Image (cartoon, rainbow, N blue to C red):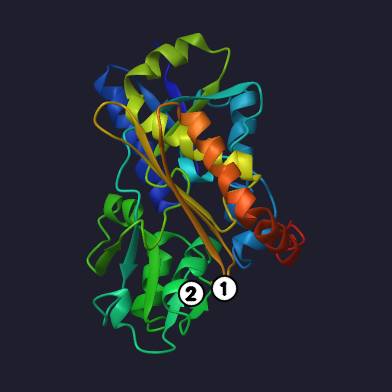
Amino acid sequence: MAKLRIGSRGSQLALWQANHVASLLRGQGHETEIEIIKTTGDKITDVALAKVGTKGMFTKEIEEALADKRVDLAVHSLKDVPTELQPEFELTAIMKREDPRDAFISIHYASLDELPKNARVGTSSLRRQCQLKTVRPDLEIIPLRGNVDTRLRKLESGEYAAIILAAAGVRRLGLDKNVRQIIAPEIMCPAVGQGALAIECRKNDSHVRELLSFLDDPATRAAIECERALLGSLGGGCQVPIGAYSLQQPGGKLQLTAMVGRPDGSQLLRENAEGSDPEQLGRETAQKLLSRGADRILRDVYAQEAPATAHP
């Protein structure tokens, strides 16, 4: 049997994810190899992601390798995957989700509430910034880029009083020793797809689709489809101040929490809803947010965050 070639970014976390999938596939008797592919998002490290303005900045080059048949499947952090895929690709498997929440990480402080006035907090996410400024308008939000281990080193060197990262990433890497608080979704709504892994392949590759079917988790897929429907209906990418977290309840109904806000925390819209149809629930909740002024918020954000010139 031919080796299954897995496309992945080269970061420590991306490689953990790719190796995790490779291990599961080997457990099914398949040979695997991992091809590391550098993406646009990996090349631009000195500009806030919201200013880059490139859809698919962490997936485009990997999809090109898929299209060229240099790889058979790609492993992505789902929150990096654009809501609209190119027609020749599909998300063949959405794996069982890890904790989707954000983690408060600090050397000296036990929680967000305990941070001193005007403390420096590191994040480059407008979604996190917006929600932090809503509960603690005094905080100084400082841009933070780099891989998980790089961000943690910056914290340990004293550049920040605290940083906010996805709980799933630090746990997967075993780097959670300074996680002081897992922030409730009611305070900090997670990013769409946060904590979940997506496996993408060519839509016409029925052989690979069949081999990957055991990795798909229906409950996670339903929740993710709901969140991505909301994001798509808002016209948002992964770097705008939009959050969504859906969870399947006993009996199959989905519960959805969503937010849209201004980066400075001056306005924050939240919606909670329940429904049985994932995509319909996402779309209807998006319309409620738009009717309450989310369209004006997002229009202003896009105007302020003009795309930076792409680096060579």
Q: Quadrant of the N terminus?
A: top left
Q: Position of 104 compared to 222: left or right?
A: left
Q: Residue at x 43, y 77 (%)?
A: 121
Q: Residue at x 39, y 50 (%)?
A: 13
The quarter of the picture where residue 199 lies is top left
The numbered disc on residue 209 is none
Q: SS class of the residue under badge 2?
A: helix
Q: Quadrant of the C terminus?
A: bottom right
Label 1 near label 2: C-beta < 8 Å?
yes
Q: Nearer the viewer, residue 294 or 69?
A: 294
Residues under labels 2 and 1: Cα distance? 8 Å
Q: Residue 241 location, x and y as percent?
A: 56, 59
Q: Residue at x 31, y 26 (%)?
A: 252
Q: Residues within 10 Å of mark 2 (few under 14, many from 20)?
A: many
The quarter of the picture where residue 249 lies is top left
The numbered disc on residue 266 is 1
Vertical order, 250 against 42 (above or below): above
Q: Residue 296 location, x and y as percent?
A: 70, 58
Residue projecting furthest to the bottom: 117
Q: Residue 58 location, x and y as percent?
A: 57, 46
Kind of residue at disc 1: Ser
Q: Nearer the viewer, residue 113 or 72?
A: 113
Q: Nearer the viewer, residue 236 or 200?
A: 236
Task: Please indicate, yes or no, whether residue 74 appears anywhere in the rendered image.
Answer: no
Closer to the chain start, of discs 2 and 1, is: 2
Q: Residue 298 location, x and y as percent?
A: 66, 57
Q: Residues within 10 Å of mark 1 (few under 14, many from 20)?
A: few
For mark 2, what is the residue?
A: 133
Vertical order, 263 against 217 (above or below): below
Q: Nearer the viewer, residue 286 or 217?
A: 286
